Image (spheres, rainbow, N blue to C red):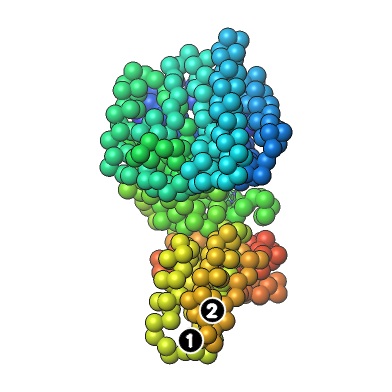
Amino acid sequence: MTRLVMKFGGSLLASPHGIRRVGDLVERVRKEGAEIVVVVSALGDVTDTLLQAATNAPGWSEREILLTIDELKRLHLSAIEDSSVEKDGKTELVGGVEASLGNLKGTLSGISILGELSPRSKDLVVSFGERLSAPIVSAEIRARGMASSCLSGGEAGIVTDNTFGEAVPISGTTARSVRKRLLPKLTRGEVPVVAGFIARSTSGETTTLGRGGSDYTATLLASSIGADEVWIWTDVDGILTADPRVVKEPATVPQLSYAEAEELAFFGAKNMHPLALGPARTGAVPVRIKNGFRPELPGTLITREQSRSRGVVKVVAFVRNVGLLTVAGETLQGRPGIAARVFSALASNRVNVLMISQSVSEANISMIVRRTSLKPAEEALRRELKNQGIVVEGDPRVAVVAAVGAGMRGERGVAAKIFEAIASRGINVRMIAQGSSELNISFVVNEADAEDAVRALHGRVVNHVRG
Ligand code: ADP
Ligand code: ASP
Ligand code: MG
């Protein structure tokens, strides 16, 4: 029997009749005889709303807390209303939403009284999105005559360390406990619904896996239970050759390797968690990205195979929320050890460096960090390098554009085509990097030029190289 993990994204769940649509998709695949574990995200933008609430709660009064609670209540009650669940079931679901929102209100009030948000309370607050959506989806599935129960990520067996906000799953323990919790349910013919993104630390606290973490939940569960495939249902036809909000009518990429998809996740395509492909790759579980509005389409299949497409570059992606950090000065020249000091100062201040490049003259080192780390990174480097004739500068208004595709390996002239396309629009390139895997060429431009750069590349490189 085919065993699938099917994950439903927030955009699909919150679309008109989204819950029924999910019910239809599960029912259809189940009728074909597959065993299914369902993973759900929070509805729509609920995680953003919760993050904002957590961040602002230290300065909030009761009234502001209630406004957020009311907004969440309205959204979930309308999803329940719109579902196929019968009347008594709806009343029960509404009771559940009210109880969860009561807990959330208590947590936000606690943060407001303390006047301070700890990483631990922040994770607890953002976990409510998936806690609220999972029971609704599970009830929809039961309403269609299938047995179903819902579990939080922790209840499903995902165990992490306690790096709140970006918790790291402990693989052996997770695999064992997921099998223990989920396999008996599948054997009984149930369709378990697991709240994505959230997990439990070894000491029992609620943790989250980081933004886009439901995709990660799905691949973790799939590799643990030996699923045949993971299907990620979303609101677009698959992985597209560029962000559809930037490029008109991008094409769907039929196939990608795990390595290519990992690069894309890292560079922000489809808001996928950067580590989500890891468990799928390790367990050799194929991943399909499919459009919930057009299930008949094949979508994108991610497997081990590294195919060459018609164009060498398969996808143009970009990341906005980054900053450029430059360390410059004559004294950098020929002084061994400065680079080491730069990176160890950043590491000890927990700044993650996403891209590095050093000019041949050695007179400067440029780095890309997340925009939220830019200020702390600048301060750390100024402290470390003071009185040495070195200037540290940070620029928050930049973006990274990346051309990704395995065909670039050993293919001459790709970089030239890329930079000609950018130059033809008069866009200034601030920094260039090429991963050693040769799966991507990425470069930094001013944020205001990023969308134009993506369009220029998409038009000239994705469709036309070797066309
Ligand atoms: P979900 O709610 O299903 O998890 P996400 O918000 O995580 O969906 O990501 C889906 C959105 O990502 C799409 O609606 C699309 O606008 C955007 N996107 C950006 N780049 C790409 C790309 N290269 N391929 C597909 N989608 C992309
Ligand atoms: N709800 C979480 C987020 O918005 C996880 C996910 O949707 O994958 O990041
Ligand atoms: Mg997502």
Residue under pointer 2 = 327
Q: Amino acid at mark 1?
A: Leu
At 51% from the left and 41% from the top, the residue drawn is 121
Answer left or right for 173 relative to 165.
Answer: left
Q: Nearer the viewer, residue 68 or 209?
A: 68
**Residue positioned 57% across, 81% down in the render:** 391
Are dots 2 and 1 in contact, CB under 8 Å? yes
| Picture quarter with the C terminus | bottom right
Residue 340: x and y, percent? 40, 76
Query: Would you place residue 224 above or below residue 94 in this image?
Result: below
Does dot 2 land on a helix, a strand or a loop?
strand
Which amino acid type is shown beneath numbered disc 2?
Val
Q: Label 1: which residue?
A: 332
Placement of 39 over or under 301, stated as above or below:
above
Q: Position of residue 311 (x, y in %)?
A: 53, 61
- The residue located at (44%, 21%) in the rendering is 149
Task: Name the residue: 49% across, 89% down.
Answer: 331
In-image side of 186 versus 56 (left or right): left
Relative image position of residue 358 (x, y in whole percent): 49, 79
Q: Can residue 20 be spotted in the picture?
A: no
Mark sitting earlier along the chain (2/1)? 2
